[in-house]
Image (cartoon, grey):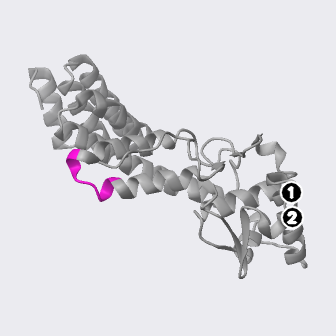
Amino acid sequence: MEQIAPDGVDGRRPFTVHVFGHTTVSTPDRTLRASDFTGVKPRQILELVALGRGEPVRKTVIAEHIWSGRPPRRWQVTLESYVALLRRALQPGVPGRATVLCTTPGGYRFDTERVRIDLHDFEDRIRRAGHTAPAHALPFWESAVSVADGTLLATEPYAAWAVDARRAHERALHAAAAAGAEIALALREAERAVPLARLATELDPLAEHGWQLLIRAELAAGRRAEAAHAFHACRAGLRRDLGLEPDVRTQELFADVLAGHAV
């Protein structure tokens, strides 16, 4: 099985852009925090280019986002000045086009030979999990979840483009947690299934599949009380928010809990 490198360790790529949690960049010399990018717009340019995962992001797209759909008349000149500020923050004294923030026809991208992006790591591990035999895929699902160790773009709580990216990521993270829990249960690894299933319920508390996975995992781990608590939490949320009762499968699982059956 392919080995997974420890998070944050990559001798080939000395720059790491973190967009999970508050935006930071680790360089060979220091760590740049959200306030170190010489302003909000240079920081948002960094974040938008990071969302490109190494693919070019067009200047027009960046301008549309950082000026909330109303770029100024001479926006291109202003945008390029912000990019210059960002490059100086990332690599002081390095000529602009030699920095890790590359100019492309009509846009910008990160040099992925020198830059690691945590969001890209998350998505890469999900891809590898999907192309790995189930018996060997569980570590990839677990490591993908571990990489996503904070709210995506927490530094940008209100920007519409960040909200959209956050929602899409939460859907992907929910699917990864559920897939990992399913495989862990199939492998009879109940203790590894529990945190994955619990994360699925936290990300989407109205999706019964996550609760079903958590009930199964807790019961398989021999914790009937915790399995019963998961059922009651599921039912309370459905009643409160949707006016619904749990579906037949969830109720069958609760019957197994009451009877003490393994699932």
Q: Which mark is residue 27?
A: none
Q: Residue at x 43, y 37 (%)?
A: 202
Q: Is residue 165 visible?
A: yes
Q: CA distance from mark 2 to mark 1?
A: 6 Å
Q: Quadrant of residue 154?
A: top right
Q: Residue at x 20, y 46 (%)?
A: 135
Asked if residue 153 lies left or right of residue 252, the reply is right
- Say which amino acid is labelled 1: Arg
**238 and 219: which is toward the camera:** 219
Within the magenta stretch, is there residue 228? no
Q: Which mark is residue 84?
A: 2
Q: Where in the figure is residue 218, as x and y percent of width and height?
A: 25, 26
**68 and 169: which is toward the camera:** 169
Asked if residue 95 lies left or right of residue 161, the reply is right
Q: Are marks 2 and 1 in contact (CB under 8 Å)?
A: yes
Q: Is residue 186 above or below residue 82?
A: above
Q: Residue furthest bottom?
A: 105
Neighbourhood count class around disc 1 (C-alpha, 10 Å): few under 14, some 14–19, many 20 upward: some
Residue tagged by mark 1? 88
At numbered mark 2, what does the secondary structure look like: helix, strand or loop?
Answer: helix
Q: Residue at x 63, y 41 (%)?
A: 21
Q: Which residues are magenta?
A: 129-135
**109 and 200: which is toward the camera:** 109
Neighbourhood count class around disc 2 (C-alpha, 10 Å): few under 14, some 14–19, many 20 upward: some
- Say which amino acid is labelled 2: Ala
